[in-house]
Image (tube, rainbow, N blue to C red):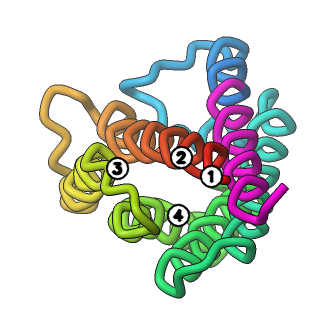
Amino acid sequence: MNKEKISGYLIFIGVAQFFIFMMIAESLYPGYSISKNYISDLGVGSTAYIFNTSIIVMGFLLIISGFLLEGKILKIFLLLSGIGAAGVGFFPENSPYHLHTIMSLIVFLFASLSSYAAFKYKSNKNLTWPIMGSIGLVSLILYIFNIYGPFNYGGMERLIVYPNLIWAIGFSGFLIRTK
């Protein structure tokens, strides 16, 4: 099995398990609202062990997959995405010195930017990846300026995260299909 295929499996496993465990944590968190709670609220309290472990695993798998791929920009962006994701788990919302906010910004920004580098990776030119990354990037900008529209802050945060999870799953499939 080649490095790209392994990278694809790692991205798929990391992203899929995070998405599943995030939904499990949301269902177990008392009174949780996807529009009125931050995703990272799941990283404190009774669901902390589920959320933090899952996002750390995703972060490490993204880091490993980044090392396995060719393409300097994609490699750097995936490494930074992985560091940010793992950092979110290592530094939950109640961490000092805004470490959680910094790690969140890193993963949000570089996951979105990775979609552009993935678009230029090898022979595939799947436009859905940078479209999803652009949705995440525009949502991040709106989120930073507290412009949530009808989604509230929790919903806007999901407009950053979900599109990036979706393009990453698609990209992982592309890598898994490589010969």
Instruction: Please state which of the two labelled residues, at mark 4 or mark 2, is closer to the viewer.
Output: 2
CA–CA distance in space, label 4 to label 2: 22 Å
Q: Quadrant of the N terminus?
A: bottom right
Residue 27: image location, x then y, percent: 65, 12
Instruction: Please state which of the two labelled residues, at mark 4 or mark 1, is closer to the viewer.
Output: 1
Badge 4 marks a residue whose secondary structure is helix
CA–CA distance in space, label 4 to label 1: 26 Å
Q: Which residue is outermost to the front?
A: 179
Q: Is residue 171 above or below residue 25?
A: below
Is the C-beta separation of discs 4 and 1 under 8 Å? no
Residue 29: image location, x then y, percent: 68, 19
Quadrant assignment, res 17: top right
Q: Which residue is mark 1?
A: 178
Q: Which residue is mark 4?
A: 107
CA–CA distance in space, label 1 to label 3: 17 Å
Residue 124 disc label: none
CA–CA distance in space, label 2 to label 1: 7 Å
Q: Nearer the viewer, residue 45 or 143?
A: 143
Q: Which residue is mark 2?
A: 174
Is the C-beta separation of discs 4 and 2 under 8 Å? no
Q: Work out whether mark 4 precedes mark 2 in sequence or the reverse, and give the earlier one.
A: 4
Which range is magenta?
Answer: 1-20
Q: Work out whether mark 2 precedes mark 3 in sequence or the reverse, and give the earlier one.
A: 3
CA–CA distance in space, label 3 to label 4: 16 Å
Q: Work out whether mark 1 precedes mark 3 in sequence or the reverse, and give the earlier one.
A: 3
Residue found at x 62% / y 31%: 19
Q: Residues within 10 Å of mark 4 (few under 14, many from 20)?
A: many
Is residue 17 shown in magenta? yes
Q: Residues within 10 Å of mark 3 (few under 14, many from 20)?
A: many
Q: Work out whether mark 3 precedes mark 4 in sequence or the reverse, and give the earlier one.
A: 4
Q: Which residue is mark 3?
A: 129
Residue 62: image location, x then y, percent: 69, 61
